[in-house]
Image: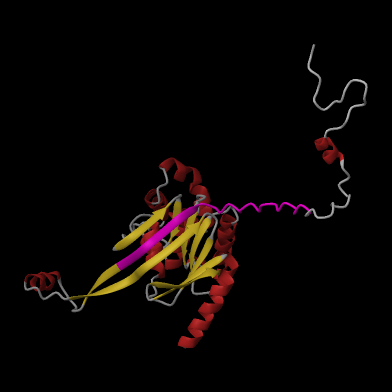
Amino acid sequence: MEEINDSLSPVTQEPVPAVTEAVKTADPGAATPAGAEPEAPKKKKKKKKKLPPKVIVVENLGVRFRIQEQKVDSLKEYFVRLVKRKLNYKEFWALKEVNLKIRKGDRVGILGLNGAGKSTLLKCIAGVLKPTEGTVTVKGNIVPLLELGAGFDKDYTGAENIYFYGSMLGYSKAFIKERFNEIVEFSELGSFINVPVKNYSSGMKARLGFSIATVVDPEILILDEVLSVGDAKFRKKSSKKLAKMMKKGVTVLFVSHSSEQVIANCNKAIILDHGHVIASGKAEKICAQYEEMISDKN
């Protein structure tokens, strides 16, 4: 025979509910017995919002240039001075102890007066310039829009430079061939695409350079005053294309002298002054600080 459950009395009596069952079925709205403390409601733990990964990390970055104190007019004079040890230089630190951590999807405006080190910082991040000290770690495909058209061969036509400049940016020949018409159409060069680049104006070269560089969808976009490319019509067109790229979650580094442009295109900003980062934070706050800074210097 099976054993009788402990919660039951002898067979002649009705079952007696266990104490634990009585507690379970008690009215939740009933008053708490005298002397007993009510149970404190359990607090729900707030889940921490997961931050996007860091895609650019700059640590203790420093860039030093050597500036020659005397003017040397010829190669012969240079070697004479070199042999006689009369070549004197002075050191100039364009950047010093710069630290930045930029997360995926951040759009960071870089503000500063001429000579503050803005372009030098972008060149280090883009891998164009090797730092004197410190490290730069980048995760993702970069498209640097720095000196547009600076890599063109002046004796090649615009069409030939599309392949030449595109290969410098890491594009395959097949990819350039596939996007060739798109590049030409966006540049608005028309028949001038078959003219040697040495006959181009600076605006035409910049337009072609912009059209080649932005034909891909990068993960990281580096912009150095490129919103001033070409005439008013092309500036509007290029700004629209950049805005479209930014909406896709591209990480952006944007150098500009205009606080309005930074606020319109960026969510964060930094101020560089004599090679040092002196402020960083939300774009609106940093732009207000920058405007105050430049008004004090004027």
Is residue 175 visible in the rendered image? The answer is yes
The image position of residue 116, as x and y in percent, is 39, 74
Relative to 108, residue 50 above or below:
above
Location of the N terminus by quadrant is top right
The image position of residue 177, as x and y in percent, is 46, 43
- The residue lying furthest to the top in this view is 1
Q: Nearer the viewer, residue 7 or 286?
A: 7
Relative to 100, residue 18 above or below:
above
The image position of residue 32, as x and y in percent, is 84, 52
The image position of residue 233, as x and y in percent, is 57, 66
Q: Is residue 245 magenta?
A: no
Residue drawn at x 20%, y 78% as measured from the top left: 69
Residue drawn at x 53%, y 69% as measured from the top left: 281
Q: Residue 5 falls in which quadrant of the image?
A: top right
By secondary structure, the bulk of the magenta-drawn segment is best described as loop
Q: Nearer the viewer, residue 11 or 183?
A: 11
Image: magenta residue range: 38-63
Q: Nearer the viewer, residue 213 or 105?
A: 105
In the shown orientation, is residue 61 left or right of residue 178?
left
Q: Nearer the viewer, residue 282 or 9?
A: 9
